[in-house]
Amino acid sequence: MNDPRTYHVITYGCQMNVHDSERISGLLEEAGMTRVTPGNDALGAGADVVVFNTCAVRENADNRLYGNLGHMASIKATHPGLQIAVGGCMAQKDRDVILKKAPWVDVVFGTHNVGSLPALLERARVEREAQIEIKEALETFPSNLPTRRESPYSAWVSVSVGCNNTCTFCIVPALRGKETDRRPGDILAEIEMLVSQGVQEITLLGQNVNAYGVEFGDRQAFAKLLRACGTIDGLERVRFTSPHPKDFTDDVIEAMAETPNVMPQLHMPLQSGSDRILKSMRRSYRAERYLGILERVRAAMPHAAITTDIIVGFPGETEDDFQATMDVVRRSRFSAAFTFQYSIRPGTPAATMPDQVAREVVQDRYTRLVDLVNELAWEENKTFAGQELEVMFATGEGRKDAETHRMSGRARDNRLVHVAVPQEPALRPRPGDIATVRVTHAAPHHLNSDELPTNLRRTRGGDAWEAAQGMTKPLGVGLGMPTFDKPAPLPAATGCS
């Protein structure tokens, strides 16, 4: 028997892409491959198959992809049999452009046919030529594919894919298509399956998650789904991302407040605080409506943490428009904000708008906005000093945990907390375990506890993490797809390489 082929997946972009990468990993493992982790070369990782799951939302994603593909050319020259695949939104958008710029790529696949990847890789290997397959409509909902979850105790669950909005800066609807909703029973069945495997936290995903139900005509479907999650035994934490202000209704606020396992956390994209710019962006709400939603959320859940997305330098943005955004930020007091400098995305209406803002002006406004967001977030975090919080510990949350002898996790409102823990392994929390911690001091982006946690609860999620340490097979239901061992080398091709 030949050794199984190895793979490595590199992900850019949003949570939907992260979730898609779990599906890509599951498909490749279902096909008999084994994942390798990055070594000195984080791109190739010594793998036989390297998959780039791409994003097309911002310009720097293009630059990173093509720069990394250039690096992969030299790796491929020294690694016979290496295959490179490019998928995701950039592949859906650029198609033939990828092979023109990087002819050493073996497979290009889109957002609608992730499940085709193993077959495309095998076809490219046998035929010794690149395979491009881009579908214009969704072939199968991603949740029907096998998965290799990155966390045994926390999981993403898609409720929909695609988007029916027409924001002038966004190319996602053109790449992901119109919104397609899953049936509630299918979503709840997946969550119950995950909980039976030890998952205790789920995040409901959708490009416009609170528009869920539009396809089957139920405007209250998302609130009903949140309440249904509250009836699942063993499901401790429910989150969702990302909602749209235009679809955010009071029944969702009531469901959040009245369902104990729905967390007091809301990510609500603002994009701009200027009504004029919001209209130009084709965002169907205005600043006062946005602030009204936040006011009602905080009335129902006084301790809710609210985060947001903001774009700086949209075409036509004046200093007055920017100051309107700063005013909404001050009034909103976000616990964090994901701030972006506008960049032209070909294919979007905003790309050809007049009055594109000079780069140096955008940079200046961006710096001022980030400074304000950090200042307000730090002020909010300082109010937690001395308070006790319930923290669920996790892997990968604290980059300095090893050297600081801490473990990190998330409070119920999703704030990041770095916690001092006992040195004895038997007394330390496991990822997935839950404890009470007392906050001793705060930083703009996290809280710290220099005291040992109390009320440590060994959870089913922690048990699942412990059991998964020796696990190599993907979690979830497989498709019975053929497996591929590492093949013997094919004869050298003649002509162009």
Image (spheres, grey):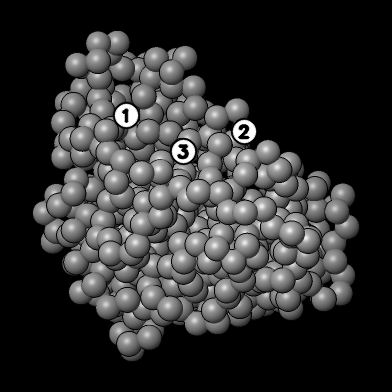
Q: Which residue is mark 1?
A: 387
Tell me the residue at 17%/26% (across/down). 455
Is 158 located above or below residue 312 in the figure? Answer: below
**Which secondary structure lies at badge 1?**
loop
**Nearer the N terminus, badge 2 or badge 3?**
3
The percent coordinates of residue 160 (x first, y second) are 39, 72
Q: Which residue is mark 3?
A: 36
**Nearer the N terminus, badge 1 or badge 3?**
3
Q: Which residue is mark 2?
A: 41
The residue most toward the front is 491
Amino acid carrying label 3: it is Val
Which of labels 2 and 1 is toward the front? Answer: 2
- Residue 273 visible? The answer is no
**Residue toward you, 197 or 439:** 197
**Residue toward you, 224 or 25:** 25
The percent coordinates of residue 403 (x first, y second) are 47, 14
Amino acid carrying label 1: it is Gln
Is 142 located above or below residue 342 in the figure? Answer: below
Q: Rounded to the nearest whole Å, what is the CA distance between mark 2 and mark 1? A: 43 Å
Q: Rounded to the nearest whole Å, what is the CA distance between mark 1 and mark 3? A: 42 Å
The reply, left or right, for residue 189 in relation to residue 246 is: left
